[in-house]
Amino acid sequence: MSGTSADAIDAALVSVKGNTTQLESAVTCHYPDLVRAQILAVSANPQGMLADLCQLEQQISRAFAEATLALLERCNIAKSDIVAIGSHGQTIIHQPTSTPAFTLQLSDTSLIAHLTGIDTIADFRRADLAAGGQGAPLVPAFHASIFGIEPSKVVLNLGGIANVTILAKEQIAGFDTGPANTLLDAWCRMKTARHYDESGDWGRSGNIAPQLLERLLQDRYFSLPPPKSTGPDYFSLAWLSSQGGDLERYCAEDVQATLTELTAISIAGALAPVCAPGTPILVCGGGVRNTFLLERIARHTHGSVVLTSEYGVDCDFCEAMAFAWLAYRYKTARPGNLPSVTGASREKVLGALYPAS
Ligand SMILES: Nc1ncnc2c1ncn2[C@@H]1O[C@H](COP(=O)(O)OP(=O)(O)OP(=O)(O)O)[C@@H](O)[C@H]1O
Ligand SMILES: [Mg+2]
């Protein structure tokens, strides 16, 4: 798995037996700085040159294969013991509401299967899109399987984009609430040359600018009803300056504080109508390390915010486990999407298999 932050590849070794899904081992392999810079540049301007995209796809796919091999070496497991790789690819553009709808995860999956010698399942999103769905989020079915639907709870993933799964006996819901880290990272990178706001300390040092916050919250994505999904190609620096106006009027750390608040308020605002106050919120993803952000989320949701790790699922590898689980669903010919979440007309088996042989 590599998400919209494009920070690293999370490789998870997962065993699925019956209803039990277990994380056996995991590694995080950072992209080389140059590859990450290219991914971010291409995502910001996806209509770039085709040859550049194809070259980037090769570099990404090699990095995915290397992450898999590093994981197997680390836990001393033979590739012959692995049933399949579930590989997400790297999202470059995601536009489920354009006509026609499309989404693109760069992945030369044939290359991954060849370099690792392991059958690889990829391209999970497009079967759902073909059936009229958003192609995202795809993690709710996994969340339901691993956390159960009783008692009710929310799973909140703080990646580049924030996505929620509402697990309840009556119905499982899920959608992207908007940005989690993507704007925080982009602003921090531009103003400080650091990749992210360590622990949220820089944002904490600023003051929230109420008028700026108000303007950003007016974006119609936040009030759209589900099903909905989005990406950093939408919530970008270009979005920030067109929605927020002249940002140079503010101290850079005040903008960071305001963006942190935007993430927290948009999550809380999205959850308020769909779950009872006090419902536990299980958080995962890199954003859990931004303690300022977590405090603001807890403040606005009035819920008990706990790490998924406290529920037995490593908060750094929950998403990566989901794509191993989706590969398992493919191998057992079972659907991976939830039409109640994505809006697809029906359940679909997701992905396609690229054999190593
Ligand atoms: N120590 C830290 N302090 C603050 N933020 C952090 C820290 N470590 C990681 N992060 C944030 O977490 C992000 C990476 O999170 P993660 O890998 O979950 O996102 P992702 O790759 O976009 O995943 P996905 O889209 O699948 O949810 C970083 O870009 C950064 O914003
Ligand atoms: Mg990541």
Image: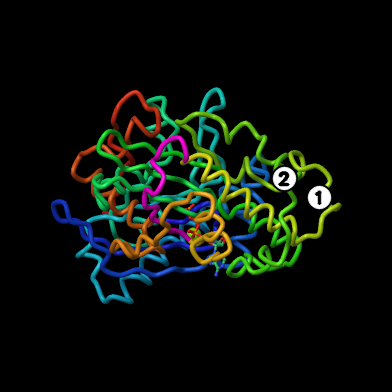
Question: Please, what is the three-letter code of the amino acid marked with disc 2?
Answer: Leu
User: Mark 1 Cα within 10 Å, few/some/many (few <14, many 20+)?
Assistant: some
Query: What type is the residue that disc 1 sits on?
Result: Leu
- In magenta stretch: residue 139: no
Rendered residue at 73%/44% (across/down): 238
Placement of the N terminus among the 4 image quadrants = bottom left
* Mark 1 lies on residue: 247
Q: Where does the magenta region start and end?
A: 272-285
Q: Which residue in the protein does label 2 denote?
A: 240
Residue 326 - label: none
Q: Residue at x 74, y 55 (%)?
A: 255
- The spot of residue 71 in percent (x, y) is 35, 70
Q: Is residue 284 above or below residue 223?
A: below
The residue furthest left is: 18
Local SS, label 1: helix
Do labels 2 and 1 touch, CB within 8 Å?
Answer: yes
